[in-house]
Amino acid sequence: MGLVLPPGVSEKTFQQALDAFAGVVGKEWVLATDEDRDTYLDAYAPGDAKDHVAGAAVGPQSAEEVQAIIRIANERKIPLWPISRGKNLGYGGCAPRMTGTVVLDMTRMNRILDVNEQFGYCVIEPGVGFFDLFNYLQANKIPLWMSVPANAWGSVAGNALERGYGYTPYGNNTNNICGMEVVLANGEMIRTGTGAMSNSPSWHLFKYGFGPSWDQVFVQSNYGVVTKMGMWLMPEPEATLGLSMQLPNPDDIGWAVDALRPLRMNGVLAQDPSLGNSIRVVTVQAQRSQFYQGDGAMPDDVLQALLKKFGLGWWGINLRLYGYDEINEVNARLIKEAFAKHTDQEFAVSKWHKGEPLDNSGAGVPTVAPLQAVNWRGGRGGHIGFSPVLPSSSEHVLKQFHSTKKRFEEVGLDYFGSFTLSERYVTNVNLMLYDQDDPAMMSRVRTLFKVLVADAQKEGYSEYRTHLSYMDEVAHTFDYNNHALLRLNERMKDAIDPNGILAPGKQGIWPRALRENRA
Amino acid sequence: MRPRVGIAAAAANVALALAMVATVAAPRTVANKQKKDTASQLEQGNKLFHAKCGYCHLQGGTGTIMLGFRLGKDKALLEDRTDLSADYIRHVARAGIGSMPRLTRIEVPDSELNSIAAYLTRPASARAAAK
C-alpha cells in the first residue's frame, strides 16, 4: 500500500509526526514503507482489506514511550490505534478501524512484571502473549493456572480487553482484570482501583477502589491505552475430572443447555463449557474438499457420514470439574443425574491429579492449532465470527440455532456454531469460514453477516464482540431511547479525548471531528 | 474464534508450548571468527524460529498441517526442509501465504528474520553438527 493519510492530516504534518515518533522510539521502530502498511492489513478481511489501512506503525518499548507518542499525536491530531500483539484474528487482526490511523503496536512491551503466588495474580504489559506467561509459570514451577482462548497466539491483556474467553473457572478473561495502568489521550498516566493510592498493597486484589470503578471503562473502548494490567490467575487445583459426551441430534443442544444452566448457576459446574457442533473438530483436522466438492452447504447425508467417520455426534460436550477428588465426584454425580433424564448415554470420564503432566488436566495450555479451521474452504483461508449473547434457555438457544443454520445454508456455508454457557447467558459464536480468493463466496459472507445482525436485533440479541467492518452496525443495534448509550459514550469520548486521537471508531464510538466516517 | 479442539490434542499442545522455549544444543567449536559468527547466527536463528514461528511451524502446528496438505508430509516441517531460499523465507514472512498472516517488522525485525532465514537454510554440515 502506498502512503495513506488520516482524514484532515497533511502529508507534511504526518511526516513530522513520524519523525517525532522516531525521536522517541528510534527510527527502526517507526514503520512506514509500503510493505509495512501491507503487514498491518487484516489477514482475514471479510471485505476489502484496504478499508482498514494503517498509515504507519510505531513500536514503543515502555509506558513512558507510549506517553511521549500520545503527546506528539495529540499535538498534531494524529489518530492512533493501540494493539497489544495484533492477533485479534477474525475481528480485524492488527488493522485499524479508520484508514490512515497509525498503529501503536505494543508487541515490544512484553515484560511479565510480577507473578504473585500468595495472592494468585500477575502484572503484565500488553505484549505478553499466552505462550510467554505459560512458559514463565512452567519454568518457575508456579502453581497458578491461566485461562487460555482457543487461538492463543495473541496477548493475555489484549484478549481480556476484548472480553475473550478461556475454559477454566477463570474463563471469563475480562473478569480477571484487577488494576490497570492507563495512559490517557493527553499523555497523563493514571492507575485504577486502589492503584490510585501511591502505596496500596491491594491494587491487584480489590477491583473497585473508592468511587467509580474504571477498569471496565477501558475494556472494548477508546478512552485510554492500557500499559500495565493486573490479572487474577487460578490456583492449581488438587484434581480435575472431565466429562465428555457426543450428542447425536441437532435439537439435543436445547435440553443440554436447560440441564446445565441450574448446575452452572448453583456452582456445581464452575467453568463455562462450550457446546459446539462437531464440524469444528473436523475443520482442525481436515479440509472440506476431502469430503465434498459440490456447491452449497454440505448436505446432511454427507455431514452424517463425515461425523461417523470421525466418531463424532452432532454436538460435542466437554465439561470439567476443578477442585478436590471427593467434591468433583459428588458434582459429577449430580451432572450425570441431570443428563440421565434426557439420554441413556454415559459420559466418558477422565481424571487428573496434581503432579501429573498437564496433558488432559483442563489447565489452560496455549495452542494455535484451532486456527487450522480457517483452511476449511481451501485457497486463502479466513474467518469471521458472528457472536450474539442470549439467555441460556432451550427456547432461545434452539430458535437461534435453527435460524442461524438456515441462514448459513442459504448462502452455501457449512454451519459452524458453539454455545458457551455462563451462569445466565450463552455466547453463541458462529464462525464463517471462507476462501478470500473466491469473490462470490465473500459477497455471500458479507450478506450473511448483515442478515444475522438484523435477525439478532429483532430478537434483542447483541454481539459481544465484532469485526472492525461491523462495529458501527452492531453499535447501532443498541437503540434504546434513540441510541442514548452511544450518545453518552461519545460525550465521554469528546470530554477525555477532545482531539479524537485514540482508536477513532472502535466499537462504534467516534470523536466529534471524525463522526462523518461512521458507516 | 473459539472452537475447542478435542482432549486428544492437549498432549500435543503441552509439548508444543514447551518446545517453544527448548534450548538449543551448542554448535561444535570452530576455529575462526567468521565461522563463529555464522554458528552464532544459526543458534540465534534456531531460538528465534522456535520463539516467533513455532506457534504454527513445529510438530502439530497449523502451518505444519497446511504444508503437509499442500506439499506432502516430507515438506511439512520447515526445520527439516532443504529446498528453501532465504529470499523466499523473507518474502513469505512479510507477504503471508494462504491463511498465514504477514509478520510485521515490530514482531520480527529484519535482523531477526535474517537469522531465522539463515537457520532454515543452514548447510548440511550445520545440520549434521546439531545431531
Image: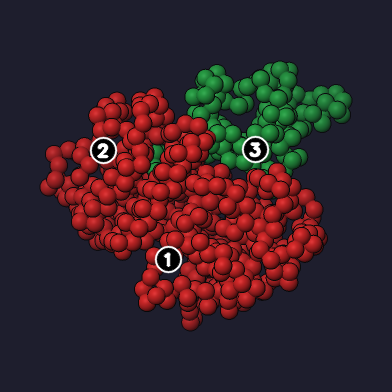
Chain colours: A red, B green
**Disc 3 residue crowd, few under 14, some 14–19, many 20+, Cα 10 Å:** some
Residue bearing the label numbered 3: B95
Tell me if residue A20 comes above or below residue A271 in the rendering: below
Mark 1 or mark 3, whichever is nearer to me? 1
Query: Which of B96 and A183 lies nearest the eye of the viewer?
Result: B96
Q: Amino acid at mark 3?
A: Ala
Tag 1 subunit = A
Residue located 56% across and 67% down the image: A516
Which residue is drawn at the image coordinates 17% and 38% (left, top)?
A: A345
Which residue is nearer to you in this view: B63 or A177? Answer: B63
> For the residue carrying disc 1, how many other residues have a C-alpha within 10 Å: few (<14), some (14-19), or many (20+)?
some
Name the residue beneath numbered marker 2. Answer: A314
Mark 2 falls within which chain? A
Q: Is residue A120 above or below residue A148?
A: below
- Residue A307 visible in rendering: no
- Disc 2 is placed on an element classified as loop
| Distance between the alpha carbons at the discs numbered 1 and 3 | 35 Å
Mark 2 neighbour class, 10 Å CA radius: few under 14, some 14 to 19, many 20 or more? many
Say which residue label 1 marks: A476
Residue A317 in the image: x percent, y percent? 28, 43
Report the side of A121 relative to A404 (left or right).
right
Q: Mark 2 belongs to which amino acid?
A: Trp
Earlier along the polypeptide chain: callout 2 or callout 1?
Answer: 2
The image shows residue A174, relative to residue A252, as above or below, that is below
- Asked if labels 2 and 1 share a chain, the reply is yes
Whether residues under marks 1 and 3 lie with C-beta atoms below 8 angstroms apart, the answer is no
Q: In screen coordinates, is A347 left or right of A151?
A: left
